[in-house]
Image (cartoon, rainbow, N blue to C red):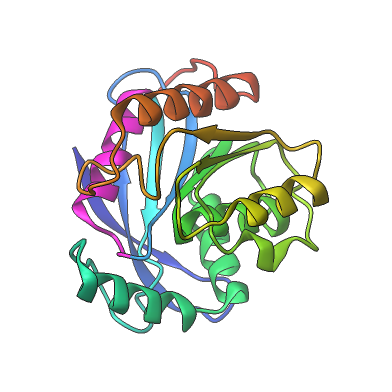
Amino acid sequence: MGDTVRLTSPRDGFVFQAWRSAPRDARRGGLVLIQEIFGLTGHIRDLADGFAADGYETIAPSLYDRRKPGFAADYDAQGVAQGRALSEATPWDEVAADLQAAIDALARPVFVVGYCWGGTATWLAACRCTGLSAASSFYGRRIPELLGETPRVPIILHFGKSDTSIPPAAVEAIGAAHPDIPIHLYEAGHGFVSDRRVDHRPDAARLARLRTLQLFALNGGGRGEL
């Protein structure tokens, strides 16, 4: 359903890959889908294809390409270690610029959704990037690093109540710093959307997805012409 495209960062002219999935029916808008620490995996491509089926032209950028082109790790201890190292070596200024390239490659309205490390990058995009209409962030563990920045578009946050990598105090700190931003909590752990992980919770994943699609629909994601 999708294909590989190339994007150029406005920050340094670096050319990187992305997965693009186009809707087959009327287009609701564009969507930038941001990877987990595991890279541009089959799971991320499947999510992109799923959003395209809902009418969103979706681009999922490969954000580690400067350091490890085409990186896609397994969901195991080695994959976690590799992905975490790459994510920590990738500065937020660079991420914001690469996300801007993805946003600019899509016709408006454009939305953003991200998971895990991508959940934090979604917050980053909502704060720093232009051309967005709304954002949905899933279990962004590092959002507390960016609490001094305020999203410029409507955003909702999703967290698992039993996510051991994101303690309740961190979620509470986000809510205290930004009390007007909706935070949804689920009976789940980290990565509950991914059917490749032991923490996958189908009911929570479906509800969070419905909330995400509703947010997009309320902010310009209505049916349009191809």
Instruction: Give the image location of residue 167, x and y in percent.
Output: 56, 56
> 171 above or below 7?
above
Q: Position of residue 57 (x, y in %)?
A: 39, 36
> How many numbered marks appear?
0
Q: Nearer the viewer, residue 121 or 144?
A: 144
Magenta highlight on residue 138: no
Main SS of the magenta segment?
A: helix
Residue 109 visible, this orientation:
no
* Vertical arrangement, residue 164 with respect to residue 87, above or below: above
From what the image shows, is residue 186 above or below residue 11?
A: above
Please indicate whether residue 65 sits to the left or right of residue 148 in the image.
left
Q: Is residue 143 left or right of residue 198?
A: right
- Residue drawn at (39%, 41%) of the image: 58
| Region in magenta | 38-54
Residue 137 position by quadrant? top right
Is 42 magenta? The answer is yes
Q: Indicate whether 170 appears above or below 2.
A: below
| Residue 5 percent location from the top left of the image | 30, 57
The residue at the point 20 percent across, 47 percent down is 196
Residue located 18% across and 64% down the image: 74
x and y percent of residue 212 in the render?
Answer: 51, 29
| Residue at left offset 37%, top offset 70% | 16
- Position of the C terminus by quadrant: top left
Residue 47 quadrant = top left
Can residue 185 be seen in the rendering of this structure? yes
Which quadrant would the N terminus be assigned to in this image?
Answer: top left
